[in-house]
Image (cartoon, rainbow, N blue to C red):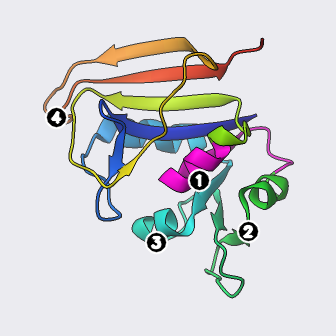
Amino acid sequence: MITMIAAIAKNNALGKDNDLIWHLPSDLKRFKKTTSGHHILMGRNTFESIGKPLPNRTTIIITRNKNYSKEGCLVAHSLEEAIQMAAKDAAIYIIGGAQIYKEAIDKKLVDTLDITQVHHEFEADVFFPIIDLDYWEETKRVDFEADEKNKYNYSFITYKMKTN
């Protein structure tokens, strides 16, 4: 199973200046729990914004640069190559960025969208692709109110690709 996992704002904002716009500890905790023990696939810019391989995960960086390497990470030169490298993993996670998300959706390479919807609009320079409900079906939603640790209302939403 290949899942795209992302935290997106109401206006589909993902980030600005190669960084996250908001801080939701609940989302980060869920991300860690969900992806631990699995392959995480990401574009080079996303990796550079994180700065290091995440613990207890196999990091695959996707880049067109044939000379790129990072200690502790695997490097692929296409999304398909990255997926092939992770093929033995029962749960592969695509974690960004915007170009990788768009390519994965356009090529229908993913089965599931694991979305944290932040119920606020933000100024951003990168955006998540529109979730086309002709192709995706919401199968699970858990809503949360803002609290002392999480500044915004948010929802954890799972979408599965429709089988038509």
**Number of other residues with Cα within 10 Å of mark 1, as a class: few under 14, some 14 to 19, many 20 or more:** many
Q: Are marks 3 and 2 in contact (CB under 8 Å)?
A: no
Marker disc for residue 100: 1
Which of the 4 image quadrants contains residue 118?
top left
- Residue at image point 25% right, 46% down: 23
Q: Is residue 138 above or below residue 56?
A: above
Q: Position of residue 102 (x, y in %)?
A: 57, 46
Q: Which residues are magenta?
A: 87-104
The quadrant of the rendering that contains the N terminus is top right
**Number of other residues with Cα within 10 Å of mark 3, as a class: few under 14, some 14 to 19, many 20 or more:** some
Q: Amino acid at mark 3?
A: Glu
Q: Secondary structure at mark 3?
A: helix
Which of the 4 image quadrants contains residue 19?
bottom left
Q: Are marks 4 and 1 in contact (CB under 8 Å)?
A: no
Q: Is residue 97 visible?
A: no
Which of the 4 image quadrants contains residue 13?
top left
Q: Quote the CA–CA distance across marks 4 and 1.
A: 28 Å
Residue under numbered circle 3 = 48
Tag nearer the camera, 4 or 1? 1
Pointer 1 or 2: first along the chain: 2
